[in-house]
Image (tube, rainbow, N blue to C red):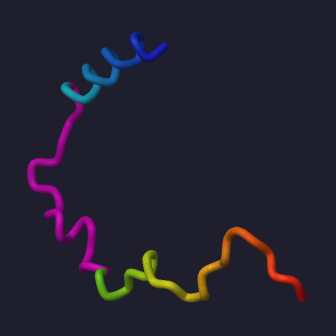
Amino acid sequence: MGRRVWPHEILEFLRARRLRWGPTVREFWGRPQDAEEQSMTATRPERRVGKREAA
């Protein structure tokens, strides 16, 4: 299936009409969100993996 779709995708990309004066990358993506990044912050203590402790 991919061998049939790929040439079609390439031809459509080459034929596509593009805006001559489109938005800049900054306008398209917006302001940086580095200060809002929380994906790597620890919000809970890490779970212990291994032996279970008796209650």
Task: Note whether 15 is above or below 30 in the view shown.
Answer: above
Please state the horizontal and vertical placement of residue 39, each as a whole percent of the image: 45, 76
Please state the horizontal and vertical placement of residue 43, each as a whole percent of the image: 55, 88
**Callout count:** 0
Looking at the rendering, which quadrant does residue 21 occupy? bottom left
Please state the horizontal and vertical placement of residue 27, each as a whole percent of the image: 20, 70
Report the side of 52 relative to 43 (left or right). Answer: right
Residue at 26% in and 23% down: 10
Instruction: Return the residue found at the far left.
Output: 20
Q: Is residue 31 magenta?
A: yes
Looking at the rendering, which quadrant does residue 53 occupy? bottom right
**Span colored in magenta:** 15-33
Nearer-the-camera pick, 1 or 28: 1
Nearer-the-camera pick, 9 or 35: 35
Residue at 31% in and 80% down: 33
Task: Note whether 30 is above or below 15 in the view shown.
Answer: below
Q: Is residue 13 magenta?
A: no
Nearer-the-camera pick, 2 or 48: 48
Instruction: Return the residue found at the far right.
Output: 55
Report the side of 50 relative to 19 (left or right). Answer: right
Looking at the rendering, which quadrant does residue 46 occupy? bottom right
Report the side of 22 relative to 54 (left or right). Answer: left
Quarter holding the C terminus is bottom right
Residue at 75% in and 71% down: 51
Dominant secondary structure of the residues highlighted in magenta in the image: loop
Nearer-the-camera pick, 7 or 34: 34
Residue at 19% in and 26% down: 14
